[in-house]
Image (spheres, rainbow, N blue to C red):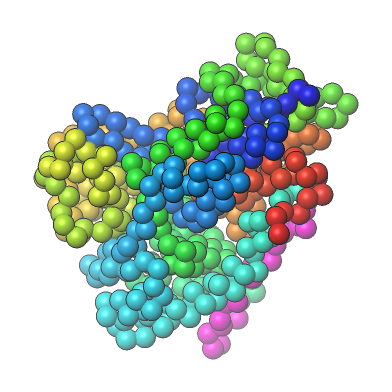
Amino acid sequence: MAGIAVIGAGMGAMAAAARLAVAGRRVTVLERGDTYGGALRRYARDGFAFDTGPGLLHLPAVYRDLFVKTGREPLEECVELRRVDPDARHVFADGTAVTLPGFSHGGVRAALDEALGAGAGQRWSDLLGRARTAWDATRRPLLEEPSRPGDGGPTPDPYPASRRRGLLRRRPPTLAEVAEDELRDPRLAALLGGFARSYGLDPAEAPASAAVLAYLEQTFGTWYVGGGMRELARALHDRCVARGVEFRFGAEVARVREADGRATGAELADGEVLDADAVVAPGRADAHAPGARARFTVLLALDGPRPAGEPHRTLLHGPDRLVTVLRPDDPALVPDAGHEAVVLTAVVPAGPVAEPERLADTLVAAADAAGLDLGSRVRWREVRTPLDHAAATHAPGGAVPPPVLAGGGGAWRREANLGSPRGMYRAGGWAHPGGGTAHAGMSGALAAGLLLEGDDWRGSR
């Protein structure tokens, strides 16, 4: 048999490759860049190290399952996983701040009541209860079952939005409208919108079902990988190699070869032809897809130690943007205990950024205005624009895909895992079930399942 060609070495592609290899298939990964991991990259300088893509992990069960099914060593023996608790400090536009605990709905209710007033916690809890209804309705069809072209058509938005007296909408509400109707506090609305904005979604455009993102994080928690998220990519690459996957870097695929209506291999840019029984390829990236945005990141090498008790994550809810501040307490990221490595991130449109240094100044100033005292401690900084992300990942304009969502007439779907022609399968953030590190891992499982079990496979039970 000719084996399987996997195009790209992102997290979805490697998740598929590991599963295919452990099933006895010969797998070759063709990556046009010089390394693996997709968006999970690292920048290192002068003893400092930073994640330049996602800095935290949600739904670690996706990778626990992958490592259990592809080898003897579980995920926790390959990387260090830490629960992030408290989950985050939120600073709102009016200066109000609240620190929310992780893994405790009751603790979140109490914290919101104390910071925002009696009843705030219950309104938030009631909304999460409705978000759970949406999660229960969409978890399997949108996350655990593979997608096929035209499969089932658009999925209706299952979020059971409550209706305020006298209010009748002629269409399903957006996430922003749900926040206005049900939370009745601009700070709670910013809190809900922040969960969507962190994925690049605009609450004014996202369907109400995007409330599941808040439910997921507050139910299943947020996790940090010791040494940074790049360590997760390293561990998955190592698992692939241990299972016999061959990696070829600097191997740009010019086109997928076809014969008799079936994918038969890949032709490289240098003219080399690699025969294959099937091809796993990324979904087609689209910088203009609904919800597609890009990351603007400022890496700060700071003099002075990380302040004791400082939350790992602070979210600054400004009037026009969300700024995420990550301050991991990890000695692997700094030259010594007298320094700190901090990452500031804002979501921006894909493509060039006008005056990136000025925008970086704005993000640092926002952090300082929230009392974080970063600007006076900067030893040096590195600014990473969407075009830097594009150069590393080849995504157009540095666009980052959002996760798949129900509603919106199907606009929030991604490319199907079962591709065309026959023998073509899709994995990665631009394929079903969309963007995010956990979702990319799911896409690899779905593509591998279809390839191994047949095109009628409905997902693991």
Residue at the image point whose x is 33% and y is 53% from the top: 324
> Is 29 in front, or is 407?
29
The residue range painted magenta reads 150-168
Residue at the image point whose x is 35% and y is 42% from the top: 228
Q: Quarter holding the N terminus? A: top right
* Residue 279 visible in rendering: no
The image quarter containing residue 319 is bottom left
Residue at the image point whose x is 53% and y is 20% from the top: 249
Quick check: 216 above or below 259? below
Quick check: 326 above or below 102? above
Q: Is residue 252 magenta?
A: no
> Is 98 in front, or is 63?
63
> Is 128 in front, or is 192?
128
Counting from the top left corner in percent of width and height, residue 252 is at 59, 20
Quick check: 246 above or below 75? above
How many marks are shown on the rendered structure? 0
- Can you name the residue that lies furthest to the front here? 72
Q: Is residue 161 magenta?
A: yes
- Can you name the residue that lies furthest to the top here? 271
Residue at the image point whose x is 60% and y is 58% from the top: 405
* Residue 113 visible in rendering: yes
Q: Quarter holding the C terminus? A: bottom right
* Magenta region, main secondary structure: loop
The image quarter containing residue 88 is bottom left
* Residue 26 shown left or right of residue 15 in the figure: right
Quick check: 214 above or below 58? below
* Residue 370 shown left or right of residue 63 in the figure: left
- Can you name the residue that lies furthest to the right here? 260
Counting from the top left corner in percent of width and height, residue 352 is at 41, 34
* Residue 416 shown left or right of residue 54 in the figure: right
Counting from the top left corner in percent of width and height, residue 110 is at 32, 80
